[in-house]
Image (cartoon, rainbow, N blue to C red):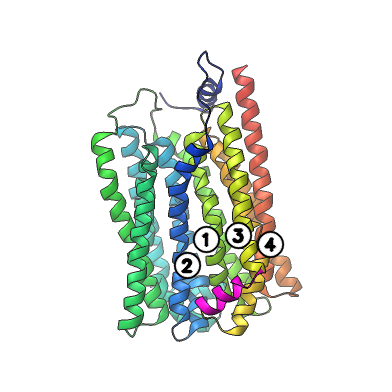
Amino acid sequence: MRYSQSAVSDRTAKSLAPTATPAPLLKQRQIFQLWLPLAASWLLMGAEGPLFTWCVGGMEAQKANLAAFGSIAFPISMVIEGPIIMLLAASTALCRDWPSYRKVRRFMIWASVALTALHALIAFTPLYDFVVGDILGIPEEFHAAGRTGLMILTPWTAAIAYRRFLQGVLIRFGQSRMVMIGTMVRLIVLLSALVIGREFSDWSGIAVGSTAVALGVTAEALFARWAVGPVLRNRMPQLDPAADVITRLSFLQFYLPLAMTPLLTLFIGPAGAAAMSRMPERDLSLAGWQVVHAVVFLTRSAGFAFNEVVVSKLDGPSSRKALKKFAFMVAFGTSGLLALVALTPLSDFILGDLYKLKPDLRQVCATALLFAIAMPFYQVFQSFYQGQLVHAKRTRGITEAVVIYVCMALLGLFVGVQWGAFAGIYTTITVFSIGGITQTLWLAHRARAVRRAVAKTAA
């Protein structure tokens, strides 16, 4: 039977309706045990950016290589992989038996082939000059290094798609710890490649860093395949009678709104680079963006991990209250940590002693961190409300929220370029923060509407 919106509502209502035997209360310890390995995985993945910056920052042409990776190679690669980022949530929600596993896997393979072809088309043809020069407006002195990084990152999208699909299966069957171990493997490979490339080769900083990133994510994908083997052999049921039969149409109706979320969000990265190229302090902003993004990503990682926790644990009325309480603790903790870094001598240690940034770049990055303090807080609640919508298979509200974010961000960037009163990196982070807060508020509104609809149906 194909699942429809009404069928989803009925089934969700039944799962949340009072029963003769109340469901056991969800405890903070249970949430923490599921969240911790996922948060550690995101944290380790977030360490990739600081490690890249540490390696490249200690090599020749510091600003040029950081700018080329942070404003060209990395954001373009992220936009291309955008449609498959939510495979983790989709796999967690849908892969309940062998038929559903095979159908989601088929989508993953075709999407990987198509997106890798697009990546190669941009990296290896004259289309690169059009995208980077004419559309993004990146200064020409960064073009050659950016193309090198983008070429090396060609396997990135397929590796990400494969490992996120398999990690969703691991989470679905209670093996989130293996996700964390896989990210540790990725980080070890990354660090090893960075050190070897820097110490024993004459490659440029962007070539060493991009190669290390590509090798790391490939190693993580291979580990995920090894880790999921026992689950597929011993725990994946041949057929789950309670699972919906997934058709091509039902999957696309579920997944396409979900996929638009990162795709539209990641589109803003290159848009931000294009805007900073047209605002004051151009070179410092483009180089500093990679550094600031890496530090902020580390503090947001705990919030990113919360999405799959909500999807898998939102089973009863008491669950939402427990999850919300946990969300507040994580939100205050992560934003507090970023504020501690931005407002104390920790920023001097990280940016100066650790990254060895030149004084002018260090000052710009330290100031930019102040404008990002709200980001970790609202990221937790984005995952909280988004997880509720995914759990209910009402994903359209997620797309609406991202469209609002993109529109506000583009408008803010346009005003920033026209006004030209502040350094580009300060304006860009402020605009992104305001857009992110608005996006979170819309997700909260949509999640509240779904809860009311479920309660009405149950009554």
Task: Give the residue displayed 64% in from the left and 37% down from the top.
Answer: 446
Q: Which residue is mark 4?
A: 431
Left-right relation of 185 to 399 = left
Is label 2 or label 4 in front? Answer: 2
Task: Give the residue displayed 69% in from the left and 68% down from the top.
Answer: 427
Q: Is residue 17 above or below residue 313?
A: above
Tag 1 or tag 4, which sits nearer the N-term? 1
Secondary structure beneath disc 1? helix
State the extent of the magenta-drawn residues as a range: 344-355
Q: Which residue is mark 1?
A: 298
Report the magenta stretch's main SS: helix
Residue in front for this viewpoint, 321 or 28:
28
Is label 4 or label 1 in front? Answer: 1
Tag 4 or tag 2, which sits nearer the N-term? 2
Tag 3 or tag 4, which sits nearer the N-term? 3
Is label 4 or label 3 in front? Answer: 3
Left-right relation of 183 to 366 = left
Residue 428: x and y in percent read 65, 67
Is label 1 or label 2 in front? Answer: 1
Tag 3 or tag 1, which sits nearer the N-term? 1
Which label is found at residue 49? 2
Task: Give the residue displayed 55% in from the left and 66% down from the top.
Answer: 295
Secondary structure beneath disc 3? helix
Q: Amino acid at mark 2?
A: Gly
Q: Is residue 351 magenta?
A: yes
